[in-house]
Image (spheres, rainbow, N blue to C red):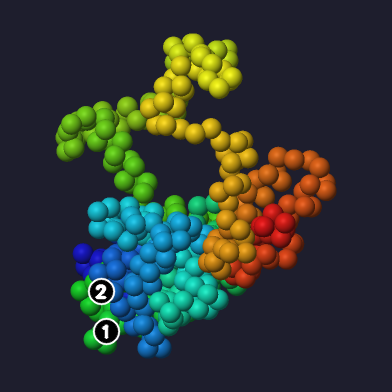
């Protein structure tokens, strides 16, 4: 159909627009849904296991599996959201967040840290994989920007930040064109080419749209939020139409018209969050208020029964405190030290926001504090809160 209209998705001679039939001065651009393209790229890498970049480096899904396995064994995550659901993605293959979190900058940072700093053998040779993940993460951010005040690659496409995203789009376009399978065939020519071709079409279309809508004289826009071109809006609209038909997923023209009118009339009406609010701090009366004397202490009947049933021993308050279970910081592995330093920064930042004492705030840390670990230095993009060594310990 695109060929008949005048567009072409052949990567070597790609044309991502066609002329409007009623207005020769207007172009209609072709954009494949970027969220779906990211899922297809994740699916291809996970199922095939290995891809080859244009420099001959091996891009392996196994590194993501090993990272999840390591985090599961250690009990702490290295500043990412990787879980078993991301590895067993086939059970939830339509969830975009699983694909986006698997191919995220935080996963790339964790793999790089395990390879270069911790020197873990399972992560050696992961440079090509880290580059692949970072490229698609940043490309997805550019083609899915939502917030006009965002920074970096998540910022809208504008003239002020063109020097940031324009060179990257040029480089990543050539990078995707050079990706191959283990047989040496270009990914853009294999049976699993859709995700990669979709990203190429997105790059080309957004560059041309930016020129037409922002760069030209008397252009109507100052910037482009690329999420506005997402398929999500249509999906939400169609979902609302289907919801009006209850069990009927295929409405007739009359039913569609009625549902559309209903949405137009009710789209700005907000419902209440609940029927009532709790206004008085009154708790439900306890049914076991009676107590008895055990070893000279008042103990409730329920607790006394539990003590007899499980043969519990009385312990001192010191043994019951949480700090008795905390391991010595000197015996913690380098992996856990890195994870704890990242968590400590988050906790210190939240605590600092709720206090006004200047000395207390200085004791917690700041964005200018020296990094407590090499992992924090790797994660820092210019605004990461750094905890002081005392908070970390």
The answer to which image quadrant residue 100 occupies is bottom left
User: Residue 130 appears at what percent x and percent y?
Assistant: 45, 75
In this rendered view, identify the residue nearer to me: 321 or 65. Answer: 321
Tell me whether circle 1 and circle 2 mark residues in contact (CB < 8 Å): yes
Marking on residue 255:
none
Q: Which residue has dot 1 on it? A: 182
The answer to which image quadrant residue 315 occupies is top right
User: Which quadrant of the figure contains the C terminus?
Assistant: bottom right
The residue at the point 46 percent across, 21 percent down is 304
Q: Which residue has dot 2 on it? A: 48
Dot 2 surroundings within 10 Å: few (below 14), some, or many (20 or more)? few
Q: Secondary structure at mark 2?
A: helix
The residue at the point 35 percent across, 63 percent down is 38
Return the residue found at the far front: 295
User: Residue 142 appears at what percent x and percent y?
Assistant: 49, 63
In this rendered view, identify the residue nearer to me: 119 or 369. Answer: 119
Relative horizontal placement of residue 24, taking residue 335 as reference (left or right): left
In this rendered view, identify the residue nearer to me: 283 or 307. Answer: 307
In this rendered view, identify the residue nearer to me: 329 or 143. Answer: 329
Dot 1 surroundings within 10 Å: few (below 14), some, or many (20 or more)? few
Q: Earlier in the sequence, mark 1 or mark 2?
A: 2
Please say if 317 is above or below 77. above
Please say if 173 is above or below 199. below
Relative horizontal placement of residue 343, taking residue 137 as reference (left or right): right
* Alpha carbon distance from label 1 to label 2: 9 Å
User: Residue 345 appears at what percent x and percent y?
Assistant: 64, 55
């Amino acid at each position: 159909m695109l060929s008949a209209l005048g567009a072409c998705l052949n990567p070597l001679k790609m044309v991502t627009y066609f002329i409007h039939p009623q207005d020769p001065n207007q172009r209609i651009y072709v954009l494949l849904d970027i969220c779906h393209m990211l899922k297809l790229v994740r699916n291809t890498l996970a199922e095939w296991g290995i891809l080859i970049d244009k420099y001959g480096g091996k891009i392996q899904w196994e590194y993501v599996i090993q990272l999840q396995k390591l985090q599961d064994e250690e009990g702490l995550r290295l500043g990412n959201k990787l879980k078993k659901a991301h590895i067993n993605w086939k059970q939830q293959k339509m969830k975009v967040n699983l694909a986006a979190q698997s191919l995220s900058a935080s996963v790339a940072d964790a793999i790089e840290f395990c390879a270069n700093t911790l020197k873990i053998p399972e992560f050696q040779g992961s440079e090509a994989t880290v580059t692949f993940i970072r490229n698609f993460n940043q490309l997805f951010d550019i083609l899915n920007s939502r917030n006009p005040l965002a920074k970096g690659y998540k910022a809208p496409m504008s003239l002020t930040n063109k020097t940031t995203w324009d060179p990257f789009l040029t480089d990543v376009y050539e990078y995707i064109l050079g990706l191959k399978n283990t047989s040496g065939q270009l990914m853009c020519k294999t049976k699993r080419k859709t995700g990669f071709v979709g990203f190429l079409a997105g790059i080309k279309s957004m560059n041309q749209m930016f020129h037409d809508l922002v760069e030209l004289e008397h252009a109507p826009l100052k910037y482009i939020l690329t999420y506005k071109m997402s398929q999500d809006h249509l999906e939400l609209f169609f979902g609302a139409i289907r919801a009006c038909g209850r069990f009927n997923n295929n409405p007739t023209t009359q039913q569609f018209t009625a549902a559309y009118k209903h949405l137009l009339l009710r789209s700005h009406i907000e419902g209440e969050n609940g029927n009532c609010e709790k206004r008085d701090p009154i708790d439900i009366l306890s049914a076991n208020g009676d107590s008895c004397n055990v070893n000279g202490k008042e103990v409730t009947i329920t607790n006394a029964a539990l003590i007899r049933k499980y043969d519990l021993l009385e312990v001192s308050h010191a043994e019951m405190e949480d700090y008795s279970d905390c391991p010595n910081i000197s015996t913690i592995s380098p992996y856990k030290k890195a994870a704890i330093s990242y968590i400590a920064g988050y906790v210190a930042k939240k605590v600092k926001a709720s206090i006004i004492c200047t000395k207390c705030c200085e004791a917690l840390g700041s964005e200018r504090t020296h990094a407590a670990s090499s992992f924090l230095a790797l994660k820092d993009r210019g605004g990461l809160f750094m905890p002081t060594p005392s908070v970390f310990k």
